[in-house]
Image: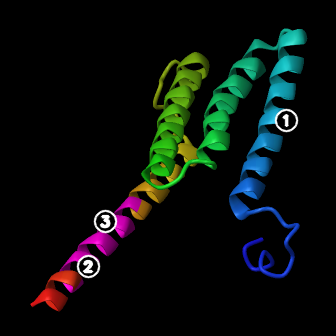
């Protein structure tokens, strides 16, 4: 979307497209949890809720700018891992039975992005200091 945006003005910005994808995913999850609740499938309902709440955070995170975006990703990773631990406790009676793959991957993404941002800030401060000498 970013490459086509200069030529095709009707293409929405990339963060809108990503948010739209997460919104469609959220609609699917809410549909699944509604059907599971109607059919009294409590285990599927719990799992759908544990996925829908962090995804809701991701939808709103797509519209945040700067460090607020990273705070939203932190909240998503934290909620994802906490909800997954609750699901593991419910199913396997051990909150650490399996790891939350998406939560751990999001933590790696956030740590890498924050490290890269701080490294760039540190490097630019050093270059600025050298230019002023």
Within the magenta stretch, is there residue 111?
A: no
Point out the tag, 2 or 1, that comes first from the N-terminus.
Answer: 1
Toward the front, the furthest residue is: 132
Query: Are the residues tagged 2 and 1 within 8 Å (C-beta)?
Result: no
Question: Which residue is the site of mark 2?
Answer: 123
Which of the 4 quarters of the picture holds residue 48?
top right
- In what quadrant of the picture does the C terminus appear? bottom left
Q: Which residues are magenta?
A: 114-127
Q: Position of residue 132 (x, y in %)?
A: 14, 87
The secondary structure type at the circle numbered 3 is helix
Q: Earlier in the sequence, mark 3 or mark 2?
A: 3
Q: Mark 2 vs mark 1: give the one in front.
A: 2
* Above or below, 68 relative to 129: above
**In which quadrant is the N terminus drawn?**
bottom right
Which residue is tagged 1?
28
Cα–Cα span, label 3 and label 1: 37 Å
- Residue 104 placement (x, y as % from top left): 49, 48
Which mark is on residue 118?
Answer: 3
Of the pair 113 and 81, the residue shown nearer to us: 113
The image shows residue 59, relative to residue 14, as above or below, that is above
Q: Are marks 3 and 2 in contact (CB under 8 Å)?
A: no
The residue positioned 21% from the left and 82% from the top of the image is 128
Would you say residue 117 sits in the magenta stretch?
yes
How packed is label 3: few (under 14 Cα within 10 Å), some, or many (20 or more)?
few
Q: Callout 1: few (<14), some (14-19), or many (20+) C-alpha neighbours within 10 Å?
A: some
Could you tell me residue 60's position as x and y percent?
63, 40
Q: Residue at x 52, y 18 (%)?
A: 93
Report whether 23 appears left or right of 67: right
């Amino acid at each position: 979307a970013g490459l086509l945006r200069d030529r095709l003005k009707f293409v929405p910005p990339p963060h809108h497209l990503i948010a739209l994808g997460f919104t469609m995913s959220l609609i699917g999850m809410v549909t699944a949890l509604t059907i599971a609740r109607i059919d009294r499938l409590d285990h599927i309902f719990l799992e759908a809720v544990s996925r829908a709440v962090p995804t809701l955070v991701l939808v709103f995170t797509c519209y945040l700018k700067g460090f607020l975006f990273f705070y939203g990703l932190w909240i998503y990773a934290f909620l994802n891992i906490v909800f997954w631990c609750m699901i593991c406790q419910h199913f396997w009676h051990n909150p650490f039975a399996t790891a939350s793959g998406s939560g751990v991957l999001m933590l790696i993404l956030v740590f890498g992005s924050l490290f890269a941002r701080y490294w760039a800030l540190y490097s630019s401060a050093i270059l600025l200091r050298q230019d002023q000498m």
